Image (spheres, grey):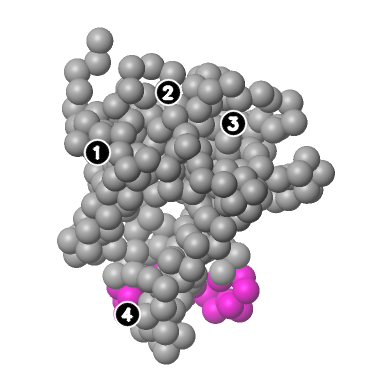
Amino acid sequence: MNGFAAELLNWMAVVIVVLFMLFAILELRSRGFGMPTSLTGGRMSVNFGTAILTAAAELLIPFGTLSAALFASQNDVGLFNIVAAPVGLILVTALLGRTLIVYWLHRAFHKIPLLWRFHRIHHSDPYFDISLGVRQHPLILLVSLPVYIFGVIALGLPVWAVILVDILMLAAAFWEHADAPLPQRLARALGFVLITPNSHHIHHSSRQRQTDSNFGSGLVIWDRLFGTYLEPEQETVERIGLGDADDLIADSLWKQLYLPFKPRG
């Protein structure tokens, strides 16, 4: 691991906290610094509880994306360990590759019933704010992590690129779930390149047609390319959440963790 990558890794926890605080301030500012009704103890215990459990699970798994990058580098495996490329091209390729993987994984989580059982915890929250960006079932890692590892090894990504892309994707998750809708003109301009809070808000609608759209994170290119993008200006979201009985247990950490195993009627 080079010095730049090691420094990034050392500062990663600080970066995560700073990013969360910045987007939290953005949300508060959009509300006139009033306290939101969504800020309840039960909801926070689920959203941050699942985040902590997911982080703990990542620490317990011995081979992750950073290990994959080191493995690829030490064994000269993958595209960028065979073909020399400038830093900018490596970073752009890493970001395009990661966002493409996230897009198709996200579609799979919605379309494959077994995966939807684990992903539905992310949609059972009837509120939309940055804490929703970290609300995931920890066992989702068993599906997503191997795919990310394959992508890192196939591209031969260096450690610094993996860390930078992880930070950018985390920033995107906070940004997209922020309860801070952009002015229409600005949202339209940014929406040519980025997933915005306005467009991702549609994805959390209780209406299935809207939920089955805007799957991307970070870059909007994949939704536009594969025909799953809905324009925020043309959609009205009437309700956030699943719109069923699971919304009633949205604030129970244990019930949300058990949700994938709950018999469906």
The total number of labels drawn is 4
Q: Is the N terminus in the top left, top right, bottom left or bottom right quadrant?
A: bottom left
Magenta stretch prevailing secondary structure: helix
First along the sequence among labels 1 and 3: 3
Q: Which residue lies furthest to the bottom in this view?
A: 3
Q: What is the magenta range?
A: 69-90
Which amino acid type corresponds to the residue marked 1 in the rendered image? Leu
Instruction: Identify the disc placed on residue 78.
Output: none
Front tag of 1 and 4: 1
Front tag of 2 and 4: 2
Q: What residue did someone put label 4 on?
A: 74
First along the sequence among labels 3 and 4: 4
Q: Could you tell me residue 77's position as x and y percent? A: 37, 70
Q: Could you tell me residue 206's position as x and y percent? A: 49, 22
Q: What residue did someone put label 3 on?
A: 202
Which amino acid type corresponds to the residue marked 3 in the rendered image? Ile
- Category of crowding for the residue at label 4, using alpha-carbon neighbours closer than 10 angstroms: few (below 14), some (14–19), many (at least 20): few
SS of the residue under disc 4: helix
Left or right position of 99 against 88 = left
